Amino acid sequence: MSMKESKPNLSHSQVTEIVKQLFGLTASIIRPLPSYDDQNFYVASSDGGEFVLKIMNSADSQNFTVLELQTHAMNFLHQRGLPAQTALPTLTGQLMSLEEIDCGFGKQKYMVRLLTYLPGTTIAKITSSPQILYEVGKIAATLDKVLLQMEHPNISAFQRKSFKWNLGSIPLLNQYLHVMDGDPVQKIVKGVMEQYQAQDAPKLTLFRKCINHGDINDHNLLLEPDGPSAYKISGILDFGDMSNGYFIFELAIAIMYMMIENPNPIDVGGPVVAGWESVFPLNDAERDALYLLVLGRFCQSLVLARHAVIQQPENEKYLMTTAKTGVRHLCRLWELGKEKVERIWFLSAAQFSQGTVINSSLD
């Protein structure tokens, strides 16, 4: 089944019916929200409540255990003071419900959840100050550290060996590389993959393990004002890419996505690293791997987005959001080289840590 056929495409009337039938709510406002391969709706009910209805694609809907774990993790983080969404129970007390729906490709089963709606503005819509970037690093490290305490009988399901978005899956890009035939950037992607295999893959045993959120990007973090010129993180969204990985993976992913819309992308790494290390200082092997892992995530994003567009041409604008500027950043990082980029990042991070620039509002 293609991605297009597995992605849900519910009409407003179908959403109204599901919300009423499963949760006993009368929807007064329904508004679509962007999504990569699922379908999300903002739903306001007539009694004043605000929610997000999330309908998983039919392929991922079959993996009940992983979805249950993600839902559990969101609740676990929320209970420990992190601004994660939580799932609301159906009328029968379930946090997830597998529903048979016809979206134009015959009846298929889609996992449905109603999540709390979190206030705030996505980082993508705000020019990221060093203070915001510091908070991003800090919350990313805090999240992974808190998840170390999580227990669940099926926690081993996060060992998603062939999950293409795990940073350890950079070698899997080989099977998609043909989508870049004729593009000069393909040479850089191949170079990054070769260096990853030679330099980072052998060091995996030196990295500290954890469960990764896996998608700390500028559309998955919400901000609210915190005083006249500062912001605090008011929401962490989309736990669909969770998997077992390493702390350094999460940091690399956060840096890469914070670079996307930033007018000075090379300067992003320093404050994010400083925020991260205020919670979880890096060891030597992790520091040494960071540059290549950030490039690896750019390559994943670029190649997998191109592949997705072939399957979902009607969703091209959203799918290529990151890739558009990502190509430029990847080329620039590659051109500058590891030594120069690391010097910029770690020098800047050290200055932050000495408190010369910033005071964190999350303390």
Image (cartoon, helix red, strand yellow):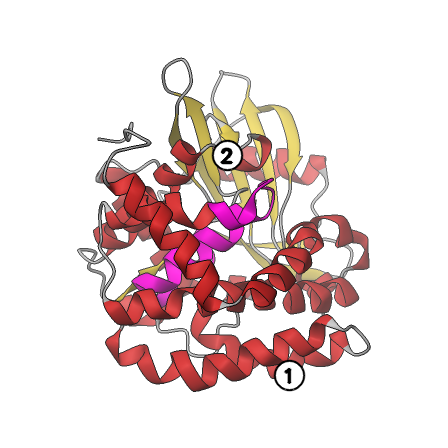
Q: Quadrant of the N terminus?
A: bottom right
- Tell me where residue 278 sits by quadrant: top left
Figure quadrant of residue 43: top right
- Residue 175's tag is 1
**Picture quarter with the C terminus:** top left
Closer to the observer: label 1 or label 2? Answer: 2
Identify the residue shown where x is 44% and y is 86%. Answer: 198
Identify which amino acid the numbered label 1 is placed on.
Gln
Depth check: give the residue in front, 238 or 122: 122
Residue 157 picture location, percent across and down: 34, 70
Pointers 1 and 2 in contact (C-beta within 8 Å): no
Report the residue at 32% width, 65% height from top.
287
**Mark 1 vs mark 2, CA separation in Å:** 35 Å
**Is 28 on the left or on the right of 132, as rendered?**
right
User: With 306 as the anchor, is 76 left or right in this view?
Assistant: left
x%, y% of residue 295? 53, 66
- The image's mark for residue 326 is none
The spot of residue 340 in percent (x, y) is 47, 61
Crowd tier of the residue under label 1, counting other residues whose Cα lies within 10 Å: few below 14, some 14–19, many 20 or above: few
Depth order, front residue of 268/65: 268
Q: Is residue 248 magenta?
A: yes
Q: Which mark is residue 128?
A: 2
Residue 208 in view in this figure: no
Residue 351 in view in this figure = yes
The magenta-colored residue range is 238-267
Between 262 and 303, the one nearer to me in the picture = 262
Q: Please count the marks in the image.
A: 2
Residue at the image position 64 percent from the left and 52 percent from the top: 322
The numbered mark, 1 or 2, whose residue comes first in the sequence reads 2
Q: Is residue 239 above or below residue 75?
A: below
Disc 2 marks a residue whose amino acid type is Ser
Task: Note whether 198 is above or below 26 in the view shown.
Answer: below
